[in-house]
Amino acid sequence: AKQLNFSSWLPPSHPIVADMMLPWMANVKKATDGRVDFKLLAKGIGHPKSYYDGVKNGIANAGYTCNNYTPGRFVASEGVEIPFLGDTSEAMSVAYWKTYQKYFIKANEYRGVKLLGVMVHGPGQIHNSKKAIKSVADLKGMKFRISGGIAGAVAKSLGMVGLQASATKNYEFLSRGVADGTLLPLESIKSFNLMKLVPYTTIVPGGLYNVSFYLVMNNDTFKSFSPADQKAVMAVSGQAWAKLAGRAWDAADRVGLAAMKANGNSVEKASPELVSEIKDATKAIEADWVKRANAKGVDGVAALKFFRGQVANYD
């Protein structure tokens, strides 16, 4: 079996690689009796936003990235990024895969590659260097590093100045004072070594936003496998991978939270008043997404209802 190339833009120690991608590669190898075997490239194939085309054009056999690093390209996926969708990556990631299969697939946004899996990170939260956030007014004019897409719309609706950049830029932006804060899940504060740079964290129950990811393979690579191996690869991808990745993310979020507390950081849960202010400020985001999803041939209202039901009933 020849080794296939897998490209990552995050260091091998990051939970996405160590706890989600590498275990998936091992599962693929085992499921195909070693016939499909991946090797992590020592160096990624470029900026995270170039991964879709890089895999499509065969620069790497497989890879992953965030949908929102290329805003406007994956409209359907933005539906799982809106505020207040859930508290665990596992429930949301499995719900996302099912919602994708039932509704989002109609938009055909991953044409040209083989979509192996989707996930969302743990609920996104507010981290900053200045003060504990008590009201939306506290955020006005503060500069926040954001990933783009829905996170950008959320930042704007709350009066933040959004600076779009990939997560790997957080340390540079915060240490140089370019940004006052960042929007990230709890895991990332430890993973990107930001603990001392953002001593104030505000946890929004249900999540301020999410970021969705895709795991894709080059079409020709996938077609080169026997039908039995294609089936074996998909058996450990799709919903199985959403569950594995989501569970790993939730564990990493717990580690991140414990590390912040151990460091003496201020970690506060948003008050009911603040939550209600955020809901008011962001409520147009959902309606706007529904309109854009409908234009792509996806029933946005039905898709969100289905997604929320899957999250609520996830055990």
Image (cartoon, helix red, strand yellow):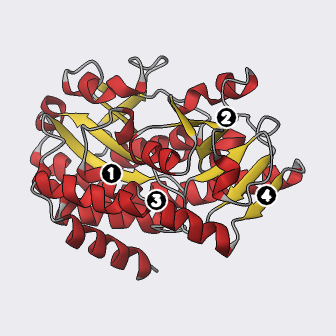
- Seen in the picture, residue 146 relative to 314 is either above or below; the reply is above
Task: Please tell me in which quadrant of the rendered image residue 288 appears.
Answer: bottom left
Looking at the figure, which quarter contains the N terminus? Answer: top left
Instruction: Label 2: state its secondary structure.
Output: loop
Residue under numbered circle 2 = 192
Q: In this orientation, which residue lies closer to the viewer: 280 or 115?
A: 280
Say whether disc 4 or disc 2 marks the residue closer to the N-terminus. 2
Residue under numbered circle 1 = 78
In three-dimensional space, the C-alpha distance between marks 3 and 4, rounded to whole angstroms, equals: 23 Å
Instruction: Label 3: state its secondary structure.
Output: helix
In three-dimensional space, the C-alpha distance between marks 2 and 1, rounded to whole angstroms, equals: 24 Å
Instruction: Determine whether label 2 and label 3 are within 8 Å by CB.
Output: no
User: Three-letter amino acid code at disc 2?
Assistant: Phe
Residue depth check, mark 1 versus mark 3: number of the one nearer the observer: 3
Residue 205 visible, this angle: no
Q: In this orientation, which residue lies closer to the viewer: 240 or 229?
A: 240
Q: In this orientation, which residue lies closer to the viewer: 108 or 13?
A: 108
- Seen in the picture, residue 89 relative to 111 is either above or below; the reply is below
User: Three-letter amino acid code at disc 4?
Assistant: Val
In three-dimensional space, the C-alpha distance between marks 1 and 3, rounded to whole angstroms, equals: 14 Å
Horizontal side of residue 162 vs 238, given as left or right: right
User: Three-letter amino acid code at disc 3?
Assistant: Thr
Mark on residue 267? 4
Say whether disc 3 or disc 4 marks the residue closer to the N-terminus. 4
Check disc 1: other Cα within 10 Å, few if <14, some if 14-19, many if 20+. Answer: many
Instruction: Determine whether label 4 and label 2 are within 8 Å by CB.
Output: no
In three-dimensional space, the C-alpha distance between marks 4 and 2, rounded to whole angstroms, equals: 18 Å
Instruction: Determine whether label 3 and label 4 are within 8 Å by CB.
Output: no
Task: Please tell me in which quadrant of the rendered image residue 70 appears.
Answer: top left
Q: In this orientation, which residue lies closer to the viewer: 4 or 151?
A: 151
Check disc 3: other Cα within 10 Å, few if <14, some if 14-19, many if 20+. Answer: some
Residue under numbered circle 3 = 282
